[in-house]
Image: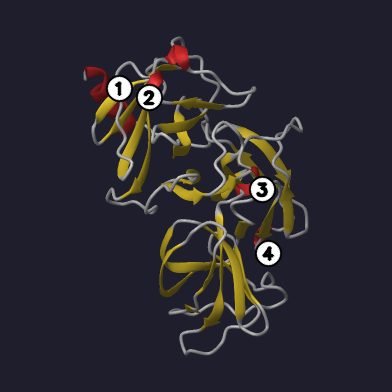
Amino acid sequence: MKKILFCILILSSARPVLNNPIAIPFVYISEFTFDANNKWIIELRSGVGLNFGSNLIDSICVFTSAGYSKIRLSDVKFINNTDLFVITSDNFISPLIINKNGDKIKIISFPSQIKYYLKVDSLIFGSYPGSCIDNIDPGYSLIRIGYSPAIFCKCNKPSIGLMNPSGVGCFATLNGFMFDKNHILVRKQSFDLDNQLKVDGSGRFTTKVFSRWLRTNKIMQMGYYDVLIEPLDLNLEPDSIYEKNIYLLSDYIVSVEKNIELDFELQIRNYPNPFNSTTNFFVKIPTGLQGKAGHINIYNVNGQKIFSIELSDKSLYQWYGKDNNGKTVASGIYYYQLVIDSKSYKNGSMILLK
């Protein structure tokens, strides 16, 4: 118990920043399911290469509503040179119970050195308060889609121990018409929900949405700002189609030349987000900063810069999910930072799903 309190004090007194990257050893939940015998299985991913028991991870504890137990680190085996490993109740020092009807699973990675930071990750599902997943049916799993906060979706093609290819089995289709706050059809606009939500000339839209309980009162206009909407409250199942109109409650920007030519201040936005292999960056530089050297720097979850895109006189750039050595990076969360004339202006996050 003393060790837990000590680590919490460290966490509250210091925070890592992108400009001073350090390694942050931790594990987080990637996928979760129950097998045919109702025994739970958790797929975990490492935040960095884990050197258990020496200079990074000292122990990993898992907490549920029924109690907690510690993973036997000697049982951890990474799968086929990936950062994935799988645990079951057999890999714990003492039995750990997870309620199939709903629970909160919390994982704490304890670092072995003071210079590192205790890391907590969690998954909520079923009837447990705060869940966005109603249940886990046989043949389904929960796959991570968000990191801050942690968000999971329901998948009808479990891939425990494997990379889920392009989020297969994780999406529902949402169709409908869009109306502005005066109940007039919105035409030829681009917004963002989980993926691009594009309204055609008839006012009709279609988009892919992660299968979960979707509760939101806003969407984002591509490249600009959040737009308030009449709240959506939908329980979305994988590979299902839903008809739901969207009613805007606040103003939006009328598009000019594909929605990227309005004279706004400094902007950067990536889309699609999440993305599979390639994401685009839209960048708008105000007149006073044009002609100055600039970059889009990309960082991993450890705050390490892995790639840099040099700015030119264009507004659209691409990142192909590779590091500076040309190596394809793993699925996960990444951060971007817009730097002009050696000064940081804008930051954002994005999710790579393979």
Q: Of callouts 1 and 3, which one flags the residue occurring earlier in the amino acid sequence?
A: 1
**What amino acid is at disc 3?**
Asn
Q: State the residue at coordinates (62%, 26%).
A: 82
Viewer-nearest residue: 142 or 229: 142
Q: Nearer the viewer, mark 1 or mark 4?
A: 1
Q: Of callouts 4 and 3, which one flags the residue occurring earlier in the amino acid sequence?
A: 3
Which quadrant holds residue 84?
A: top right
Asked if labels 2 and 1 touch by Cβ distance under 8 angstroms, the answer is: yes
Q: Which labelled disc corresponds to residue 287?
A: 4
Asked if labels 3 and 1 touch by Cβ distance under 8 angstroms, the answer is: no
Residue carrying label 3: 276
Q: Of callouts 3 and 2, which one flags the residue occurring earlier in the amino acid sequence?
A: 2
Q: Quadrant of the C terminus?
A: top right
In percent of width and height, residue 87 lies at 45, 25
Image: 231 above or below 100 = below
Q: Nearer the viewer, mark 1 or mark 3?
A: 1
